[in-house]
Amino acid sequence: MTRVLVVDDEPNILLSLEFLMQQAGFDVATAEDGERALASVAEQTPEVILLDISLPGISGFDVLERLRADPAHATTPIIMLTAHGREVEREKGLALGADDYITKPFSTRDLVEKVQALLASRKSNSQGQEQP
């Protein structure tokens, strides 16, 4: 089963995203802050990470930067989910290596479709590459 890590410090959003992803057929792990997110990724790498920017302690941008700097997680698909809709923040997230950037509020159907499309493109890319 495909594992999705949802990282958000807002309990209601965390619960609703967990439920949404489970309904879409994913195995879901959650984290309320950046440190827990990094620990969860180290424990078991998810296939996709939904990452909020505004987190207590380590920000979502910092989590993204740390994961992209780690060869073991450099290509893990990461979608930034945030209430920060300014273009400068979107550009920063994408420049740091996010695969997508979605502002809240968002359509739950669109989010599930984006996750599925990202997984499908990763799967087809990895199948198209020759293994050494």
Image: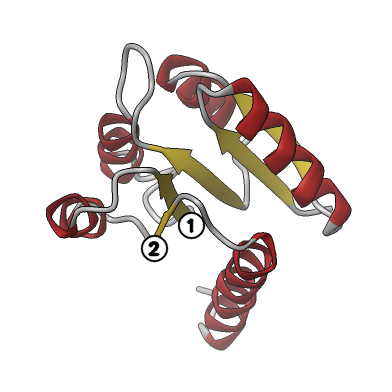
Q: Compare residues 42 and 51 and report the one nearer the observer.
A: 51
Q: Position of residue 120 (x, y in %)?
A: 64, 77
The furthest residue to the front: 105
Q: Where is residue 85 in the image (x, y as percent from the top left)?
A: 28, 53
Q: What element carries label 2?
A: loop
Disc 1 residue crowd, few under 14, some 14–19, many 20+, Cα 10 Å: many
Residue kind at label 1, given as amino acid type:
Pro
Q: Is residue 42 left or right of residue 101?
A: right
Q: In this view, does 70 lie to the left or right of 107?
A: left
* Residue at the (72%, 38%) spot, across then down: 16
Residue that mark 1 sits on: 77
Q: In this view, does 67 lie to the left or right of 21?
A: left
Q: Compare residues 50 and 15 and report the one nearer the observer.
A: 15
Residue that mark 2 sits on: 99
- Above or below: residue 24 compared with residue 62: below
Q: In this view, does 36 lie to the left or right of 117?
A: left
